[in-house]
Image (spheres, rainbow, N blue to C red):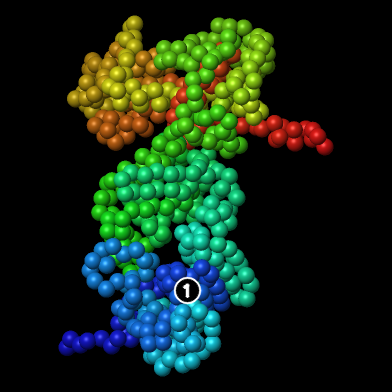
Amino acid sequence: MSIRVLPDVLISQIAAGEVVERPAAALKEILENSLDAGASEIQIELEQGGIKRIRVSDNGGGIPKDELVLALTRHATSKIASLSDLERVASLGFRGEALASIAAIARVQLTSRSVDAAHAWALQAEGGQLAAPAPAARAGGTTIDIQDLFFNTPARRKFLKTDATEYAHCAETVRRLALAQPQTGFTLTHNGRVQLRLNAEPADARVRHVLGDAFERNAIAVEAAAGTLRLNGWVIRPGAATAGRDSQHVFVNGRYVRDKLIVHALKEAYRDVLHQQLNPAYCLFIELPPETVDVNVHPAKTEIRFRDSRGVHQFLYRAVERLLGAPVASGEASAIAPAPASRPPAWGAPQQAAMPLQVAEAMAFYAPFQGSGGRGQDSGEFVAPAAQALPESGQGDAPPLGYALAQLHGVYVLAQNAQGLVVVDMHAAHERVVYEKLKSALDARAVPAQTLLIPLALTVDACDVAEIGPHLAALADIGFELSVTSPTSVAVRSVPWLLKDADPVELTRAVLAEVAEFGVARLLVERRNELLATLACHGAVRANRHLTLPEMNALLREMEATERAGQCNHGRPTWFQLGLKELDAMFMRGR
């Protein structure tokens, strides 16, 4: 078969396969053109999910009569003129093929009036065939009316989903662009009914209207800069994360993108505070010089490449991880999870409350309860602790998590702060405290070990013995001194001092289980934090361990000084705040 040059219409239909996958993709291209034209108001009308009709009207700069035909011609654009322009694209559109691709697979009418024109002009196109421009009536701006998408490519049309599904994708496209352009008003109509109306407004108001009140209530503002990189926006508190990924929005220089590097950086930032398979929600805006990011990767323009991908990854990771890791601050509390903020001042502890714990004092939690009061180890009844008066200080002087009142069922610590009642899961909270101390000690290469009075002999699998044999020195760096006594046994001579009161058998078997699954080398490098989290879980104070009021207060002070104290190592919340207004409402006070 001989080689031939394809007709322009067929070339445009082929290009449409990449650019116009579904009605939402066509709508995105048109809206981006409207925004590039400086529109401050955009009207979107859809019929049958956009399959039957997509009509977009804007009040932008408009298109002159002699450029209407060029607007529907392949590779004709006003956005770039040279390679240097392509390397620093600042507009949303630039490829000059979207409108031509749409015109090749639909019936299109383009009506526009430029600023200095006496009247508007309209251009008809059907299946790639263009008619001559004709006079029309409209105010300044542009209207593009697309009907019967894929009418001449039935193979593509049959792959479209239901009208409801296609509309949902179109609506999501509008919401994404609305998030990036809060200064522009959007009105979305489907089958004659207004579905969304957004006026020009500040960015935070636009986020509330698009992502909802729940996102606003649980969002933390992000703002960071490093050189020419800028980051601002909002991320969700870990305790409010869900299994869905429909509220993850990232914009680079105003362009919505789906980038694996960005997703990975944010996932890593949440790794220490997110429960199991939950996903965070976020709305983030990244700004950097256009020449440092390549947007010409795919015709859909949602994929990008950074010139310094590692630098961008670390910048995002550090900015969000540092925000999520900030200790509890005075007066900041949420019904879902504590609000991270800057480190609180050192609180002067009253006579009844313990001073903030040091490493040695923290281990008091592991000692058997010797004092009076509390609940018996195996008994089912609650015994009130010995009465201790709360410190007589003003609410303004109270620490963020307040002062302990009592212990409930050997599991929860009840405390009073300026806002009302704080309920703390003592195991989850202490688990985080121990975990962060283990990480800090290991980073400083100062993990003290507690030598066992009598070495503990353990019978283990021969494969485990063979695996740990060459790595005994590395295990000693994290506080475990082991020696191989036979092909199927090891002797435990010391454990990390922070975990000295935990069961050494459980600790060692937990380490060996991790070794069996991942190997020592990978465990101490790639999965170091997972190992430390496992050890912290074994070392944290257990349920039914009875604490005195000074010990409870000591735990609260530790939490206030610990990063990421709002969640345990598995991402579960460690404390909840019940405000006085909520308590009053429960008892109908003031009604």
Picture coordinates of residue 456 (x, y %)? 33, 12
Q: Is residue 23 visible?
A: no
Picture coordinates of residue 517 (x, y %)? 31, 34
Q: State the residue position of label 1.
A: 60
Residue 351 versus residue 566 in the image, above or below: above
Question: Which one is nearer the viewer's eye here, 510 or 385?
Answer: 385
Residue 318 versus residue 497 in the image, above or below: below
Question: Which one is nearer the viewer's eye here, 579 or 493?
Answer: 579
Question: Which residue occupies the extreme front position in the image?
Answer: 116
Picture coordinates of residue 166 (x, y %)? 51, 70
Q: Quadrant of the N terminus?
A: bottom left
- Residue 269 lies in quadrant: top left
Residue 510 placement, left or right of 203: left
- Residue 130 lies in quadrant: bottom left
Q: Is residue 276 visible?
A: yes
| Residue visible at 44% across and 88% down in the picture | 123
Instruction: Indicate the secondary structure of the residue bearing disc 1.
Output: loop
Question: Which residue occupies the extreme left position in the image?
Answer: 2
Question: Which one is nearer the viewer's eye here, 539 or 95?
Answer: 95
| Residue visible at 39% across and 17% down in the picture | 498
Label 1 sits on what residue type?
Gly
Residue 152 versus residue 565 in the image, above or below: below
Residue 353 placement, left or right of 90: right
| Residue visible at 45% across and 69% down in the picture | 38
Mark 1: few, some, or many residues within 10 Å (few <14, many ≥20)? many
Question: Which one is nearer the viewer's eye here, 479 or 308?
Answer: 308
| Residue visible at 44% across and 29% down in the picture | 563
Q: Quadrant of the C terminus?
A: top right
Total marks placed: 1
Residue 579 placement, left or right of 24: right
